[in-house]
Image (spheres, rainbow, N blue to C red):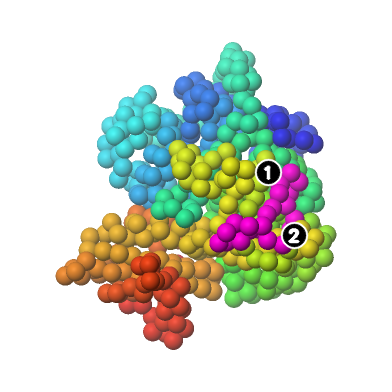
Amino acid sequence: MQWHDKTFAQALDWAAGAHGDRVAAKVGGAALTYTQLAERARDLARGLLSLGIAKDDKVALWMPDGLDWLVARWAVPLTGAVLVPINTRFRNADLRYALGQSDSVALILAPGFRSVSYFDILEHSVPDWRAQPRDGWRTDAFPQLRTVLCAGDEVPGSTLSLSAVEAEGAALRRADDALDRAIAAVSADDVAQILYTSGTTSFPKGAMVAHGPLLQNNWHAIERYAFTAEDRYLLTVPLFSATGTSVTLTLFLAGATLVVQDHYEVEEFCRTIERERITASFFVEPIVQDIKATRAHERYDLSSLRTGSGVPLGPQSIRWVIETLGVSQWVSVYGLSETSNAATRNRWDDPVETRVATVGPPSPGVRLRIVDIDDGSPLPPGKPGEILIKGYTVTKGYYRKPEETAKAIDSEGWLHTGDLGELTGDGRLVFRGRIKEMIKPGGHNVAALEIEEFLKTFPGVREAVIVGVPDTRFGEVPYAFVEPEPGETVEASALLRFCKDNIAGYKVPRHVAFVDAWPRTSTGKTQRLALRERAVAALASEVVAPETIDG
């Protein structure tokens, strides 16, 4: 099957016809078949069109993982609008930036998640949100935002009921052909979603990816994992992530069942594998370490597992998953939000050592190049350098960031990843780490500069530098060096509380150390490596920073 020239609407119809009454997704005790998911997505799409949502409009989706999220994930692109998944862990500053920078005209949200109220967070940007007119919000913070839809049985008076909008769309099934007209106007090259990804700049960048590339790349994943309609995949990463949004496509095209947990806990993870006879999942370092520490694999039957993938995982962790958990058909991958998810994948039946040591060859239609970090010259196999990627999967650019787009994608169409790797003689990629100043706590890409710029908004902070330090559970966590303004005193506990209240938890520094002078190069640049070595040494000798915070 070729999906380069297809759209989400065509994929939705095809999969519903091919897989019909099979269960597409299950969340707790609730489930949707392929037919039901397609019907609900079309109903919600009609409802969105009736609200004035039009082609190329941006629609933000800020909800915990669940069936409503999946329905909206398909419905928005059907209208020709662009889906903007919002990180469920975003707080005040994070949300303000993503919702504003994306020019979202509509926001679909849940009241909150667990103990966190999303409306309390929204109130920091829109203090009068309760008084906003349901038929058209008008706010200084978000000039483009005009419609807010809320999931749940009881919704605030300034918002529209998501279920009511879907019901209105259902009532229009035979009386209105607006959806057919909208679908006909969408092309495979149109942007389907914008994924915000941290990089080397101080704020996240919205990578624009199109219908056809997303579908084609995730169709190729089916063969690499040997997915069939009999597979049952337990999702361990959030649906809003690049992996989450892509898994929804891969499994849907394969006819498999996606099993979603609204939050991770190691016992429930293993219990779900046993109960649902899960055949595949996505592993991150905290999951592996939790299972090891609790020996949960000895109390639950995990024998149904056969395949999976995960990042960032070192060779030892991968071997442990293969040998101890029995995930014998493990598939190592490498990708970015900018490449419609995976750019390289091994095959499930490649030799084990190949799947452990490399992240595979490029996907069909994708090219790799390794270049010298200093002069950009191509390097031969076995020589490490920057990873460059070219092909149909590469982003159309960063939304409203032309300069960043030009820096990332050169005139020949090569995406400069800022990552370090090398090629084997047979063209497989070996990932060696990150060149850019970025950390990856628990699998989340976070620009150090993003956290630094935020820390400097706290009263009394003159300068801040973030480095990544090793962590047994999360792989890597932020460690903050902070220089106060002359004569000012900054309380570490207050600084950390400020972070916890305003930015996602994984961005919050786990350790804070105060400095009055910085190690500098001859050109005046801060020597980050020296700071990292200082931090690692302090932690190793238990001369820890004056304030720490638990994950």
Name the outermost residue toward the bottom: 541
Disc 1 crowd rating (10 Å Cα; few below 14, some 14-19, many 20+) is: some
**Three-letter amino acid code at disc 2?**
Arg
Q: Foreground: 369 or 174?
A: 369
Disc 2 crowd rating (10 Å Cα; few below 14, some 14-19, many 20+) is: many
In this orientation, does residue 60 appear? yes
Residue at 61%, 61% (x, y): give it. 372
Dot 1 lies on which element?
A: strand
Q: Is residue 493 left or right of residue 423?
A: left
Residue ID for mark 2: 428
Q: Where is residue 257? Give x, y as percent.
A: 71, 46
Q: Where is residue 453? Give x, y as percent.
A: 35, 57
Q: Of label 2 and label 1, which has the lower sequence position?
A: 1
Q: Is residue 169 above or below residue 16?
A: above
**Three-letter amino acid code at disc 1?**
Gly
Q: Foreground: 271 or 485?
A: 485
Q: Where is residue 439? Give x, y as percent.
A: 49, 63
Q: Foreground: 546 or 307?
A: 546
Dot 2 lies on which element?
A: loop
- Tell me which corner region of the image, top left, top right, bottom left or bottom right, holds residue 434: bottom right
In this orientation, does residue 251 appear? no
Q: Where is residue 292? Give x, y as percent.
A: 63, 74
Residue at 19%, 69% (x, y): give it. 486
Disc number for residue 127:
none
- Tell me which corner region of the image, top left, top right, bottom left or bottom right, holds residue 45: top right
Residue at 31%, 29% (x, y): give it. 138
Residue ID for mark 1: 391
Which portion, as a residue range, is magenta? 358-380
